[in-house]
Amino acid sequence: MPIDPEKALAAEPRSAEIAWDHKDVQLYHLGLGAGVPPTDPAELRYVLESKLHVLPSFATVAGGGMGVVGGLSAPGIDIDLAAVLHGTQSVTSHRALPVKGSATSTSRVADIYDKGKAAVLVLRTDVADGDGPLWTSEAQIFVRGEGGFGGKRGPSGRLELPDRAPDFTIERRIRPEQALLYRLSGDWNPLHADPEFAALAGFDRPILHGLCSYGMGLKAVVDEVLGGEVTGVTSYSARFAGVVYPGETLRVRAWRVADGRLQFAAYAVERDEAPVLGDCVLSHT
């Protein structure tokens, strides 16, 4: 079997040295649509080196986003990448992400769930520098056709949205070339750039990266609800509910559900609010 759960879970964590600087942070933020309008002080904090703040979701691309790649190449994992689907993503910030840094990234397969027709790999990455832990990220990766091995099913519930009008509704336009810009942060999958490849995958045009919509959702809520205070975010998790295309509009509906906790979801406006992100939870100080 391409996935050997016992071997994968027993494998030693894989470590790698990663580094980034202000150019990586600025490029990532531009890939999320930051800098519009270019003279807005609220946008300059994402793109001007003298004022730069780092969104916690930058953790998903820091060092080329090698955490998930490391997990998928772990011992006991031998799968067809065409059968892989990114299901959920979370990032927990242990302290503010620096504009420039170097750190050790340690990745492992934290769990494996048996969903019958698919397996779910839970990939955990811990990143620390000389001053201690920086962030922890966790991705759930669906692998079609690899279930049925008799393992535990794992959690399967969905987070219900509050039964009331949202406290905030935010819209963000996705620029037509945004996927071409975002991919420069490390995800070179041609699905997001090559129309011919996208057609082979069943799409009429290239789709936006899921992690780009993940970052866009975070930025929208940080800007409109937290006043742009990126350092206040302690954790952020989301489920990838559907695709969104460059040129479309992302609509985010958010609710305050507790002190220091927000829940939200994102939709593609032009396609009758097709779901894009679900089960989004943001915790902040």
Image (cartoon, grey):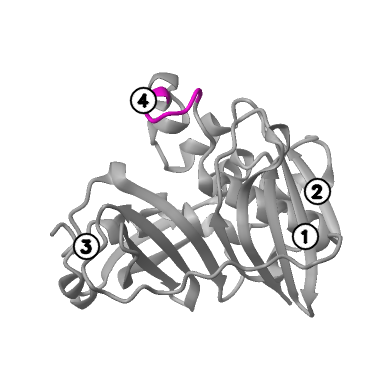
Q: Could you tell me the amino acid type at mark 2? A: Ile
User: Distance between the Cα atoms at labels 3 and 4?
Assistant: 28 Å
Decide whether residue 283 is among the magenta residues.
no
Q: Residue lying farthest left? A: 1
Q: Position of residue 191 (x, y in %)?
A: 42, 32
Query: How many residues crowd mark 3 within 10 Å: few (<14), some (14–19), many (20+)?
Result: some
Give the camera-side residue of 89 and 15: 89
- Mark 1 lies on a secondary structure that is strand
Query: How many residues crowd mark 2 within 10 Å: few (<14), some (14–19), many (20+)?
Result: some
Instruction: Residue at 28%, 45% (x, y): give it.
Output: 81
- Range shown magenta: 199-205
Q: Could you tell me the amino acid type at mark 1? A: Ala
Q: Main secondary structure of the magenta part?
A: loop
Q: Which mark is residue 74?
A: 3
User: Distance between the Cα atoms at labels 2 and 3?
Assistant: 39 Å
- Quadrant of the frame with the C terminus: bottom right
Drawn side of residue 259 relative to residue 184, left or right: right
Task: Confirm whether residue 99 shows in the render.
Answer: no
User: Distance between the Cα atoms at labels 1 and 4?
Assistant: 35 Å
Q: How many marks?
A: 4
Instruction: Residue at 71%, 73% (x, y): give it.
Output: 284
Q: Are marks 1 and 4 in contact (CB under 8 Å)?
A: no
Instruction: Residue at 52%, 65% (x, y): give it.
Output: 90
Give the residue number, with chain letter if any, for mark 2: 170
Instruction: Residue at 78%, 55% (x, y): give it.
Output: 223
Q: Position of residue 16 (x, y in %)?
A: 30, 62
Give the camera-side residue of 235 and 99: 235
- Mark 3 lies on a secondary structure that is loop
Q: Could you tell me the amino acid type at mark 3? A: Ala
Q: Could you tell me the amino acid type at mark 4? A: Leu
Q: Name which of mark 1 and mark 2 comes first in the sequence.
A: 2
